[in-house]
Amino acid sequence: MSSVPAYAPVPLTGPATANFSIAAVIFALFVLAACVSAERKDVTQGFDEVAHASYVAEIQHQGNVWPALDRMRLLDPRTFLFTDQANYLNHPSEYYALLALLGPHLEGHPRALLADRLIDVALAALGFAALLGLALAARMQRYEFYAYAVPLACIPVLVPLAGAVNNDNLAFLGGALAMLGAWQRLSTGRDRWLALALFGVVVAGWAKLTGLLLTAAMVSGVLVYLLWRRRLTWIWVLAALLVFVLAAAPYFEFILRYGSPTPETPAQLALLKDGARVAGWADLPRKSFPAYVIYFVVAFVAEWMPTLAPRSLLNYAMLAIPVAALICAFAGIALSLRRLWRGKEGALDIVLLSGTAAIAATFAIHVVYSYGRYAATGWLMDAYPRYYLPLAAIMPLAGLSLAAAIESPRWRGALLGFLIAGPIAFRLLGAPLG
């Protein structure tokens, strides 16, 4: 089978040795920062870590890897002893069973949480390494590599999330494997990379539903393209369908047990209603769906740098950076679509377009689902960008798609400079200090 060129129309390839050294430094800094975060983070601050740790402890306590969601309890964050308060999580149990197996006994042992956090650091680090591996395989030039790797390393929630017990880390790993496998299958034509992509779908799907939606849709787009270009045998299509069923198995089980792939347990409904009441949202007039969509998009951009502290004028001004990066991404997506239309597409374009379609579809489902919860309870905190971490590399790839179309060295350099410096500036100035 003929391979698809990685870039079009401007070659961005460079020496692998230099990029590997840069990647090693960035990777080491990421792991170090995640380990420091794991050591210092307050378990009660952010990412529902008490609930996730309680899920792990519940499996260890019961000796059952499929506990009833409506009977799980929360740990006391100080003593790590079970309370009478119900756990509100409604995710598949596979991630939690993995930590229950690999990690120490949590019930009654608060200090044992660090071991589980370090397991999460390892999961996130493997995912980050896979995304860096994609860039190394593409043999990008140095500044293109920076424009790809720096935005990933500067994702505001990635390091603190990596140092916390949270199933988003497993979803991130699965998405990274799916992207690496898809890229390499397109670039090399070797089917073993498609097997890696499908494995990534299972990993992300068993972590959480958004992981399944994002990775399965992205890989499906790549499969459709390969079939269209007659670069895929039907045996692989059948294998992919079987893998998708396997990846979705936890949600079929949820439908059988609870009637929904996203079970609404009494504890979760109580959390939404009580949270909306405390925040003062419950009694406010409900927004129309178009008004809610606008609110959701604005909140989504703001939550790229989540903070509980009041933002300053400078912090708000810094939001112009991700907005500008998003505009550049849309331009890059349009250019990749034009290359596909003209038959000049490369691996970059196919992965980018497939990932964009997956994000758009998942985002639409996310908004509709969130609006239903808002209409029922008044809850307004569902616009979490971290749900899209499985396809986090799509944004920097879109920037590279735009850069590849710019022939002027001056303008291409200016764009790459923004793509490199912008995330650093936003990471430093986008949220209140302290």
Image: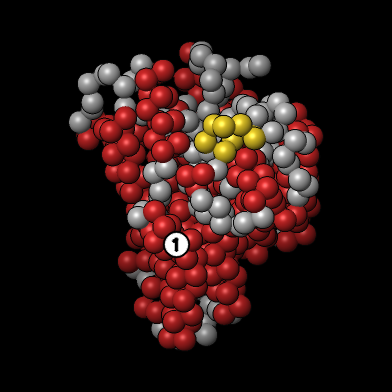
Q: Is residue 275 visible?
A: yes
Foreground residue, 143 or 272? 272
Q: Is residue 376 left or right of residue 331?
A: left
**Residue type, label 1:** Glu
Q: Residue at x 58, y 68 (%)?
A: 199
66 sits to left or right of 287: right
Locate residue 84: give its quadrant. Answer: top right
Q: Position of residue 348 (x, y in %)?
A: 50, 61
152, above or below 10, in the image? above
| Residue at the spot of label 1 | 253
- Up the image or down, 89 lies above or below 79; here it is below
Query: Residue 159 falls in which quadrant of the image?
Result: top right
Q: Position of residue 99 (x, y in %)?
A: 69, 51
Q: Residue at x 63, y 17 (%)?
A: 433
Total marks placed: 1
Secondary structure beneath dot 1 equals helix
Q: Residues within 10 Å of mark 1 (few under 14, many from 20)?
A: some
Which residue lies at the image location 39% right of the left edge and 44% below the top edge?
A: 264
Left or right placement of residue 357 versus residue 147 in this view: left
Quadrant in which the C terminus appears? top right
- Residue appearing at x 57%, y 46% in the figure: 168
Image position of 115 with respect to 229: above or below: above
